[in-house]
Amino acid sequence: MKLILKSLLVAGLLTTGVLANDPGNLTKPSAKVQSMIDKFGLKMVDYNYTKARLGKGTRKTAKAILIDARPAKKYMAGTIPSSINIPDTAYDKYIGQLKDVPKNKEILVYCGGWKCGKSPKVANMLKKDGFTNVKLYQAGEPQWKKLNYKEVGLPVVKSAQAKNAAVLIDSRPYKMFLKETIPGAISIPDTKIEELKGRFPVNHSEKIITFCGGYHCAKSHNVAKKLISMGYSDVNVFAAGIPEWKNAGLATTKSASKVEKKSEAPKKKEFSKKGAKLGADEGSIDGEWFNAFIQKDAVPSYIQIVQVTSPEEYKAGHIKGAINIEAEKFTAKELMSKLPKDKTIVFNCTAGGRSMDAWTKINEAGLDVSEIFYFDANIDCKGTDCKIEVNEPLE
């Protein structure tokens, strides 16, 4: 029944990529994002179109280049398979990845959903650089992850393996698995799925990470697609696979770690001096801890929420008690000067990307961020009535 409902949902996509289960049921770009789309003359594509352009899921077989315009941490935590990362705030640093790409190559740009302006910004930069076939998948990562599997980076896999927090599946031939694999992984070759599918978890919401021989290997994608078709809801591919795991000096079943064992690191602080609970990722506030206060309308008085979006987005909806400072318009020092003094600051936006950017800008400028954090969550507010979905930490 669960699989039938999911199939009907996908079949009901409209040409704009509308889905009833999008965060906040938003089915089109926000007014500000739409104005950017119109100004830059950009064309939108939907989920089905994007999925069809992925080929077998690898970078080599994809029929279009997918570009994730979110911050690097967001990209590593989970992206659309085959994507490369070109954050809007670091375009010049990352654009070199396209130096050998023909200017007429189809490029699909996306970010954190209907309210996210990062994708139209990057799409416009690409057009200015001479790329002539640039389109937007504006529903982006939030829609994709509800319907399909994600690609994750090494930090996610490393953390999951260390904490026994996911089922790791080696989809290469069994002889290669016996030769060397990631400790704790099980063997389900893509050619033996039907024969071995009884090894898949009973719990269909279990986190699963498949991997194989690197970015050009489609075997992990084949297994992931089978899992999605069977109704598993948290399926991920470690596309860099065994090569990146080994290059990082991490232990395999064949050899010990190349990384020298260091003395035990000091225990990470759990709370800031003022009492904010720290998140797992650097600079983040513990999302579940913070959201619990928001839901009870009881955010501690020492905390000031700062929504870093445009004034238009803030007026359309914000967390109760939040103030608005459009962070991207200011330098680190200017932004710092506008923040309330003697308060613990928590940045928020609509999908976590811009709040992460704001924190990173201040941190990289060498300014004091000991009481400045970002709230990594998908947030959809109408007035002060907010639906909040806390994002999973990278590590």
Image (cartoon, rainbow, N blue to C red):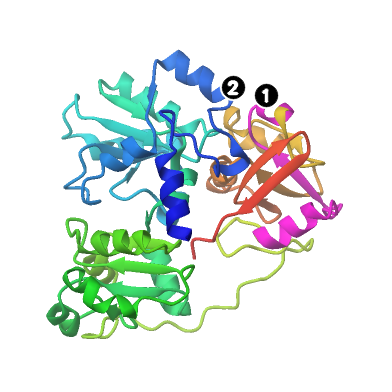
Front tag of 2 and 1: 2
Say left or right for 115 vs 286: left
Mark 2 highlights which residue?
A: 31
Going from N to C along the chain, the mark reached first, 2 or 1, is 2
Residue 369 in magenta stretch = no
Numbered disc 2: secondary structure: helix
The residue depicted at 73 percent of the width and 57 percent of the height is: 290
Q: Which amino acid does the dot numbered 2 rest on?
A: Ala
In the rendering, at what x and y percent does residue 356 appear? 56, 46
Mark 1 highlights which residue?
A: 312
The residue depicted at 41 percent of the width and 64 percent of the height is: 155
The residue depicted at 44 percent of the width and 31 percent of the height is: 14
Q: Which residues are magenta?
A: 287-315
In the rendering, at what x and y percent does residue 157 appear? 39, 68
In the rendering, at what x and y percent does residue 376 appear? 60, 51
- Using the image, determine if residue 228 lies above or below residue 171: above
Tag count: 2
Tag 2 near tag 1, CB within 8 Å: yes
- Judging depth in this view, the residue of 261 and 53 nearest the camera is 53
